Image (cartoon, coloured by chain):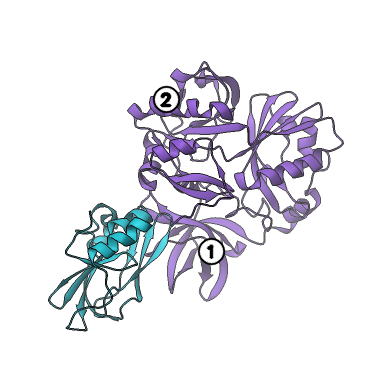
Amino acid sequence: MVPKDLRYTKEHEWVRVEGDLATVGITDFAADQLGDVVFVDLPEVGRTVAQFTAIGVIESVKAVSDLFAPVGGAVVETNAELLTQPELLNSDPFGRGWMLRIRLDDPAGPDGLLDVSSYEALTSEA
Amino acid sequence: MVQEDDASRATPLADRHQALGARMVEFGGWLMPLQYAGIIEEHRAVRTTAGLFDLSHMGELFVEGSEAASGLGYALTTEPAGLKVGRAHYSMICLPDGGILDDLIVYRLGEERFMVVANASNASIVSDALAERLSGRTVVLDDRSLVTGMVAIQGPLAAAILAPLTDVALADVPYYGIVQGNVVGVPALLARTGYTGEDGFEVIVDVAEIGRVWDAILEAGRPLGAVPVGLGARDTLRLEAGMPLYGNELGPDTTPFEAGLGRVVKLAKVGDFVGRAALEKAATDGPRKVLVGLAVRGRGIARHGYEVFSGDRRIGVVTSGTQSPSLGQPIAMAYVAPSEAQPGTMVDVGIRDQRVPAEVVSMPFYRRPAVLPG
């Protein structure tokens, strides 16, 4: 179920690194735990974010959750579709439900992320 | 994530909820289904077809005897003596200082027999308070909360789903009416009451039979689009319908007048009742705060505990809020200063580090298109 070419965080974000650009979203596990997502608040383009800090908010009918930056860098794009269709986080979390793109501030690539097997081990314990 | 609490009671339908894939949550001392397919889908089913709710957690208190009506008149803010047999009304049990101990539905089952339905978290508190307030009268209080099961079928197709399963002529049961009958051969009380803003029935049976009744209604309802509904959608449904929830809008720090429910305080009734003096004073003095509906006009969802502002002044607090599945916009209830309670008043809600504009609106937020006969 979980794409093998991505990397993950303990907070259930996923990251796809292509060159110095990282695309970020939340996993299907996170979306399922939240339930129906009805509101997403994302950082402004141009803002610099530090790794593992809260940069946005995801609200489901019942709950409010923080979105954490899985990598540090500058926000270069956010998914405008989520403003009107936040439910894409539930229906297609690894695809159209992507949340933002960050230009990595460390050209060597991000540290501290989980590979797919570590992430699957994490969610199977939950 | 929701942790199971060993201290919470399992509903008699727990196995069925598990089989239906429910996510469970602790509520009022019970482990109850939060959602099955998803809150929005369940909410829409109740608005368009029907939904089936497990209400085993609610408290059922039976009051019987020659002084049952007068005793309840002393214990509660309403006047149960004025109810016809087979009818119910919404009521409150207040503290001597006028604060709300719980909100209730009182059903008159016979000349001398009543059923009082209390919230799960308050069932034993209400039971104890009634025992104290009824003592010395010719009346027996029987707390049957743990031996009574209740399910609700709510939505425009509720009557059509229930009708083939019962010997009761549902068309003859008025809104807030209750009759004794059978559902799939099980002796049951069928009440045309609910907490969703839709037509529907609450079915009360012996706890040993609740599984059969649940299964039969769900099986009959599935082909018509009915689904099981958890507490998540129960909350969004009641919020759209402008119905208060104990612990959010109602509590010991609030009078019925402040909650906009002064109609259930029968100051004109003969005889004393618990809280009368304080409630008479509250009626004269006017409310310190007023429950209002808010339609959030900016981005964000106002939730329980968020503060409400007028300019720089803090004027109130949000008691419940959600994204309304029916309206597609954020709605909330809040207590605000009486000066800011007029519909059309613009206020701000503190949502995290933002001040988000919201408009005071009259409730309910949602009203069903028409009451269907039958």
Asked which quadrant contains residue B265, the reply is top right
Viewer-closest of B296 and B339 = B296
Sequence-wise, which precedes: disc 2 or disc 1? Answer: 2
Viewer-closest of B247 and B90 = B247
Subunit of mark 2? B
Q: Secondary structure at mark 2?
A: helix
| Residue type (three-letter) at the residue carrying disc 1 | Gly
| Residue type (three-letter) at the residue carrying disc 2 | Ile
Image vertical order of residue B370 relative to residue B76, above or below: above
- For the question of whether residue A80 can be seen, the reply is no
Residue that numbered label 2 is attached to:
B161
Residue B274 at what x, y percent from top left?
A: 79, 46
Image vertical order of residue A24 relative to residue B277, above or below: below
Q: Is residue A11 left or right of residue B182?
A: left
Image vertical order of residue B64 relative to residue B124, above or below: above
Residue B6 at what x, y percent from top left?
A: 56, 50
Residue that numbered label 1 is attached to:
B305
Q: Which of the chains is cyan?
A: A
Image vertical order of residue A109 relative to residue B326, above or below: below
Q: Is residue A58 left or right of residue A14?
A: right
Viewer-closest of B146 and B276 = B146
Subunit of mark 1? B
The number of numbered discs placed on residues in the rendered structure image is 2
Q: Colour of chain B?
A: purple
Determine the residue located farthest toward the right in the rendered image. B136
How far apart are labels 2 and 1 at the CA level? 39 Å
Q: Is residue B30 left or right of residue A36?
A: right
Q: Residue at x 20, y 65 (%)?
A: A6
The reply to the same-chain question for discs 2 and 1 is: yes
Q: Secondary structure at mark 1?
A: loop
Q: Quadrant of the N terminus of chain B?
A: bottom left
Residue B251 at what x, y percent from top left?
A: 65, 54
